């Protein structure tokens, strides 16, 4: 499972945000089921940042968000994400997709 969180942050606040995002990733990385993750900044628009994480399954990701350490060290930063769907399943050739219908967002 892949999670993509995008953020818009003023260039002047970039260094502090990068440190906060690093702390958030470290908190998530300590959770069971975490496979990997990267922090990135858009090449063409330096106000756009991304945190991409990979998880064994959706349950691992949801449990991580509920953990005390993540709530303490990551949620404030993650709550600044652009509001959009962020959880993706792998659609690599041969992968079984979870469902074929669109899920309700409401």
Image: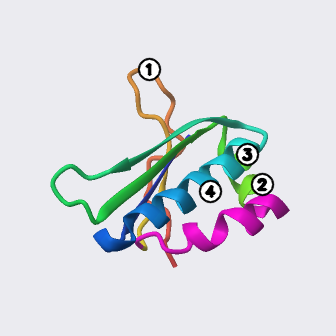
Considering only order in the chain, which callout, 4 or 3, is on the residue closer to the N terminus? 4
How far apart in space, not on screen, are marks 3 and 4 (Cα)? 16 Å
Residue 63, labelled with which disc?
Answer: 2
Secondary structure beneath dot 4 equals helix
Q: CA distance from mark 1 to mark 2?
A: 27 Å
Residue drawn 62% across and 56% down? 24
Which secondary structure type mostly characterizes the magenta part of the structure? helix
Q: Is residue 12 magenta?
A: no
CB atoms of marks 3 and 2 within 8 Å: yes
Q: Does the rendering let one see residue 20?
A: yes
The residue carrying pointer 2 sits among few (fewer than 14), some (14 to 19) or many (20 or more) residues within 10 Å by Cα, namely few
Residue 13 position within the rendered picture, expressed as x and y whole percent measured from the top left: 39, 72
Asked whether, in this view, residue 63 is left or right of residue 16, the answer is right
The CA span between labels 3 and 1 is 23 Å
Distance from the alpha carbon under mark 3 to that under mark 2: 5 Å
Q: Nearer the viewer, mark 3 or mark 1?
A: 3
Q: Residue at x 15, y 54 (%)?
A: 44
Kindly identify which residue carries mark 1.
94
Residue at numbered disc 4: 24
Q: Position of residue 79 (x, y in %)?
A: 56, 74
Q: Is residue 79 magenta?
A: yes
Q: For the residue labelled by badge 2, is the local secondary structure a helix, a strand or a loop?
A: helix
Residues drawn in magenta: 66-82
Q: Position of residue 104 (x, y in %)?
A: 49, 70
**Residue 67 visible to the viewer:** no
Residue visible at 76% across and 44% down?
Answer: 31
Q: Which mark is residue 103?
A: none
Secondary element at image label 3: helix
Question: Please, what secondary structure does the residue beneath circle 1 have?
Answer: loop
1 and 4 marks in contact (CB < 8 Å): no
């Amino acid at each position: 499972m892949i999670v993509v969180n995008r953020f818009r942050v003023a260039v002047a606040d970039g260094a502090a945000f990068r440190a906060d995002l690093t702390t958030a990733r470290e908190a998530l990385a300590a959770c069971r089921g975490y496979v990997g993750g990267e922090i990135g900044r858009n090449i063409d628009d330096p106000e756009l940042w991304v945190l991409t994480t990979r998880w064994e399954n959706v349950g691992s990701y949801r449990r991580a968000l509920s953990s005390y350490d993540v709530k303490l060290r990551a949620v404030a930063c993650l709550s600044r994400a652009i509001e959009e769907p962020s959880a993706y399943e792998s659609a690599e050739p041969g992968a079984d997709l979870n469902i074929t219908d669109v899920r309700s967002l409401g």
